[in-house]
Amino acid sequence: MTDAVAHPTPHSGSLLRQDERTRRRNNAERRFRLYGQVAIGIAIMALVILLTSVLGNGLSAFRQTFISMPVTLDAAVLDKKGNRDPADLKKVTTIGYSKLLVNSLTQVIEEEGIVVEGLASSDIKDMISDEAAAQVRDRVLGNPDLIGQTVDLKVLANGRIDGYLKGRVSMESAERDSNVSVNQLRLTESLVERGIIGKSFNWGFLTAADASELRPEAAGLGVAILGSAYMMIVVLVLSLPIGVAASIYLEEFAPKNRWTDLIEVNISNLAAVPSIVFGILGLAIFINFAGLPQSAPIVGGLVLTLMTLPTIIITTRAAIKAVPPSIRDAALGIGASKMQTVFHHVLPLAMPGILTGAIIGLAQALGETAPLLLIGMVAFVRDFPAAPPEGLFDPAAALPVQVYNWTQRADPAFVERASGAIIVLLVFLLVMNTAAILLRRRFERRW
Amino acid sequence: MNDMRLTERAVDATDVKISARKVQVYYGDNHAIKDVDVDIPDRMVTAFIGPSGCGKSTFLRSLNRMNDTIPICRVEGKITLDGEDIYDRRVDPVQLRAKVGMVFQKPNPFPKSIYDNVAYGPRIHGLTRNKAELDEVVEQSLRRAALWNEVKDRLHAPGTGLSGGQQQRLCIARAVATSPEVLLMDEPCSALDPIATAQVEELIDELRANFSVVIVTHSMQQAARVSQKTAFFHLGNLVEYGETGQIFTKPQDPRTESYISGRIG
Amino acid sequence: MPLPATLFCGLDISMSIGLLLAIILGLAAVGYVIGIRRAKDRAGGDTRRLHSLAGYHGQSVLLFTAVPALLVVGAWLLLQPVVIEARVSGMIAESDVPQGSSLDLVMSDVRRVADGLNAIAANEQLTEDEIAAMGADLGGLRSRLGNAGVALASDVQPSVFEASRTYRQMNNTGLTALSISAILVALAGLVFSASRIQAEFRARNVSESFVKLLFIGSSFVAVLTTFGIIASLVVESVHFFQLYPIKDFLFSLTWNPQFRGGSDLGIWPLLWGTLYVSFVALLFAVPVGLLSAIYLSEYASKRVRSVVKPAIEILAGIPTIVYGLFALITVGPFLRDYFAQPLGLGTSSSSVLTAGLVMGIMLIPFVSSLSDDIINAVPQAMRDGSFGLGATHSETVRQVILPAALPGIVGAILLAASRAIGETMIVVMGAGAAAKLSLNPLEAMTTITVKIVSQLTGDTEFASPETLVAFALGMMLFIFTLGLNVIALYVVRKYREQYE
């Protein structure tokens, strides 16, 4: 050992004085810390902007503009023969009802003494949504006794009138818009003052079916919610048993060999396959090969099942792994078979973990859009699917796809609808994730 | 135990390097170190012995403020290095640790080359002006750690590829490279086999020429072999502190005696 | 591909299948009860004489009744369309295929006409003979089909009508045959397993082996899925390459599908768009995700961590359609109004930057949680070693922890890249549809996934190269993402082994 070369001794100074280099190093330290804080700030800000943007655009979808007025359901128009025969009543089309509504509104305007210069009669007609007549017709057909009475009705106002109340349409934009006139907006103002036009909670948004391009005010999520619910039923019924069975096999029974390795590698890769590829699979196998119908919840459910299966298998295996071997040994030690050990001891203990995984898998499936586009769920569907199991084969929409559908339409009113639909979707996801968290908290067990 | 050697060595008492007064260390609610007073001399090896969980490692870590990295840990009392309070608000632990280096129980080479491991300290503290100087520091440190001859042909091979004993000597070289004034060693041989342990012990004895060394050890034989001063800790208290020969041959406290004779372990 | 919204008459099929399933399950339940009864009988009332508990005897009968029958139903439903298709397409002669059309197109007409006949038959309660008679008035048939919701471009040809009728009949007889054979299989299973019951019959072992077989089968579903994916991609891609030269697909620099043939379907503009958007996304997500992971695992107090970590993870739970909408209504217009137009770089609200930024936000939690795991896997001893030498925290992170974690982080970035390449909704709604090779990030470009969606949801016929190209694109996408995943999983696994 030679100490011939003198060691540099730079720490000669007092500890109480920071030397220049330490100061620089501490500044670098502070900068680095700041980068971290900025990064977190960006992430949180992105979340906040994302949520406020969606909420800001979508909350108004839950309030809708209605016109409240007394409508005389004139028997002379609705039941010319006067025999209340349903077959005859059905012959009166929505045009007949539309006239009744227009007459009622005209009468209300006259009674209230509202005068808007240059107001054409077609302007009054366009105040009311085209959907309103159909709704009144359905109501009358459902209850023919209403004919001849004067009932107070709340009918949907036209989408542009709704837009005016929500600030989407203004006097300036109306001048350039062929679908709404300035006179209509003036009339709207007077009617709003008198409480005839006003906004109220929009149940139709949650229960009604989709509506055409020209009637954003009537578009609802009913079919989409039902379609998504059907798909979730399919996913739950298929992926939970299959996933749990596969996990039990891989975790408890499978010998360690190349086959098992292959299955495991396969599952972890499947979890990372882009979702749209599952859509291609669904199109090629379920629709083209097996001949299942397009747009049907059963196909969507099958595709989403295959997609969520890896998630469920991975979480279930983790839950099963977390059950300590001592429990298995105890059961095996008193002569239980391997299968009895699994069903009597391991599964019940792993159940909270499995259910949490299943809920998270379902939540993922609920929000998935891309594969559903490919199996025809973008189709415009107005009819509610029947009750399951037959309904699983009926065409339906799905919540996320409905959002996409609405964003593809020209009328800006659909942006509001799309954002509103996102809120509904996020509420469902929130409920599911909260359930998962509560479940985990409630049953969390430390060994 | 070779008592002859011990008494022989205990002569050269010198200045105090680190002095601790009424030191308390808390882990959350747990009072881990109670009222410890100790003076650690310069250029000598001081051993901390005691049963596991007695707080000797905790006290060692408070000497270079490594305990700062544990959020729930709190240190009270006064510890001075060359008369300066190391827990003073103005003291930067980074500067302090450059003066008070540390070697850990398990060899922990960085996943870098042998050269980069040793050069790490000089680089972050800016101890050298150019590559040649750095090369020299690396070589010298490796020589001091008695590792140079074994690794000089593969300085750029990963440090993790060395054997356990070599890794620990690499860690010592790494600590020596920053030219600290005090070297703290937390059970440096507990993960090593007897041959590697002998090498490291020999090294510690040589390091005494340049540094003040504080070593925590589980093994009384090791303390007897390498140290001049010994402190016996028990349940967070410093029970007895003195010349190593004194402690091992004529312990004052019955607890020390029980421990040395193997009744507490 | 046209979307026959309500054309498929799934109702009667699903009804009869539903009924069939109910019958099979009913038989299984009966079998369970019989199994238990019989086992108790054989034991002479003393259940201790049984080798297995009576419940296991019931269970074994139940399994033998239900499972084989259900397998028959599943396999039959999958194979029946294929068999019928082959038989029916044989009925259509070369000469019946109009100029510029193909057998596939005619066959899709056959299916639609058959569906229409089904609908008419159901509405008007026609007998088979009456349906056959409709062939006499093909012009009238067209309008009747139109009323039933099946709009045809021209009158039905006689051969197509005959084929449709056969198709319909075969479907119906197929279903009847299925019902009969499935019920027979169920009954056979019931009788066989019930007759085996003896006191010393090892019912538990039998039913456990059976259940284990089911478990093995379930674990094969994942393998079958992969197989299905590969098969469907390869088969249709081969179709595509028969119609369109593979050389042009791989090397042409233009993407310009035409409605009536003569399209340029070069993958490069799409690949460029995909990589560009992914690159922008990673450029945003990797620094933000990595730095937040470092801050959270190295600096943040427990309280900050317990608030911020879940908040960032919320981003991971938000469906991509939400990000797509965010790109469409907020980020896109913002970038257009404040950057693209003032700088004169473009007028489109959908652009590479829009999609890239939003996708970057989506990837933040992905990068940060993976990096967090990886940084936490670096042993504490490394940090101690560095602190013990007097390194500052950031020096420790940058010079010890990050190099130690590098392989893992590279793996995480590769996984994120694979996510970005396969992401669909954000690019569909944010990147645009124009296939071009440009460097300007404020211009609209398109990606592989966007084109898969647009080619498969468009109006072109399924058998045309313009539609089939989607499968070739899907195959490229699958190969890319799979390659990235395999490499990433390998790297991450090697990394973990290092510290285990």
Image (cartoon, rainbow, N blue to C red):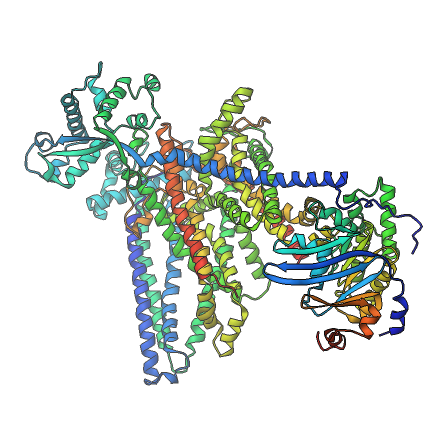
Along the line of sight, the residue nearer the viewer: C119 or A44? A44
Give residue B25's position: percent from left, percent from top: 66, 59
Q: Quadrant of residue C268?
A: top right
**Side (left or right) of C34 relative to B161:** left
**Is residue A77 or residue A59 the one in the foreground?**
A59
In the rendered image, the quadrant that contains the N terminus of chain A is bottom right
Please name whichever residue, C440 or C374, is drawn nearer the observer in this view of the structure.
C374
**Residue B89 seen in the figure:** yes
Of residues C143 and A420, the one drawn nearer to the viewer in this rendering: A420
Residue at 28% over, 43% down: A384
Q: Position of residue A45 (x, y in %)?
A: 51, 37
Residue A170 x %, y %: 34, 21
Instruction: Give the number of marks.
Output: 0
Question: In this picture, is A323 found above or below A101?
Answer: below
Outermost residue on the top side: it is A118
Is residue A376 visible in this depiction of the protein?
no
Q: In the image, what residue occupies the spot 54% across and 49% down?
A: C303
Q: Is C243 placed above or below C390 here?
A: above
- Splitting the image into 4 quarters, where does residue C67 fall? bottom left
Instruction: List x then y, in percent, for residue B251.
Output: 78, 74
Identify the residue at image location x=38%, y=85%: C49
Query: Residue C13, relative to residue A40: is it above or below?
Result: below
